[in-house]
Image: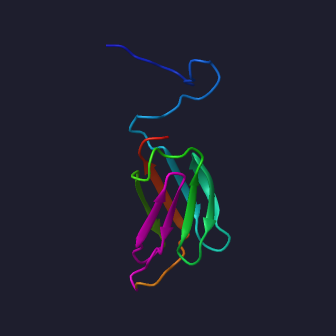
Amino acid sequence: MSTLKADTIVASDGSSPVTLTKQSAAKAWINFNGTGTIATRNSFSVSSISDGGTGSYTTSFTNSMNDADFAPSGCSGETSGTEMWESATRATGSLIVANYTSDTGTDKDSTMVSIVIHGDLA
């Protein structure tokens, strides 16, 4: 049995981060406030988010995906009600999540939005 302990793993050039290309790790993720002026709480490999209107958000990736067949997942939440995606439009460099809905079926902004992207990088 072997044990590997490391504080930092870098690419072979000794300074840049290890590139995730074909591994199963999430290639991008974001947690943001989707109400009022939307604001990122924390993210990885997301260059920006934009507000497309009530319940619609665009997440742009730092690194493009290989194709638009990546697998997005996520959730939104409030203190009450159930919210979900009505649709998601994929492009290699972005994801548009449209119409988070509450139990009433109306478009709704959410205070807690989390999105995770799995797939292969370009």
Coloration of the structure image: rainbow
Q: Quadrant of residue 119?
A: top left
From the viewer's perspective, is residue 63 above or below residue 41?
above
Q: Main secondary structure of the magenta part?
A: loop
Looking at the image, which residue sits at the far left? 1
Report the front residue among 6 and 86.
86
Residue 48, picture quadrant: bottom right
Instruction: Look at the picture and state if 106 lies above or below 122.
Output: below
Query: Which residue is depicted at the point 62% across and 18% down?
Result: 14
Q: Is residue 16 left or right of residue 109?
A: right
Magenta run includes residue 82: yes
Q: Vertically, is 113 above or below 27?
A: below
Of residues 75 and 28, the one nearer the viewer is 28
Quadrant in which the N terminus is drawn: top left
Asked if the stretch drawn in magenta spans residue 117, the answer is: no
Q: What are the residue bounds of the magenta stretch?
A: 79-104
Please indicate, yes or no, whether residue 61 appears anywhere in the rendered image.
yes
| Residue furthest right as drawn | 37
Q: How many numbered markers are drawn?
A: 0
Residue at position x 58%, y 69% in the image: 34
Q: Residue furthest top?
A: 1
Q: Is residue 85 visible?
A: no
Q: Position of residue 43 (x, y in %)?
A: 58, 50
Task: Tell me what residue is drawn at x 65 percent, y 74 percent.
Answer: 36
User: Residue 33: where, in percent of width, then height?
Assistant: 59, 65
Q: Position of residue 11 (x, y in %)?
A: 56, 22
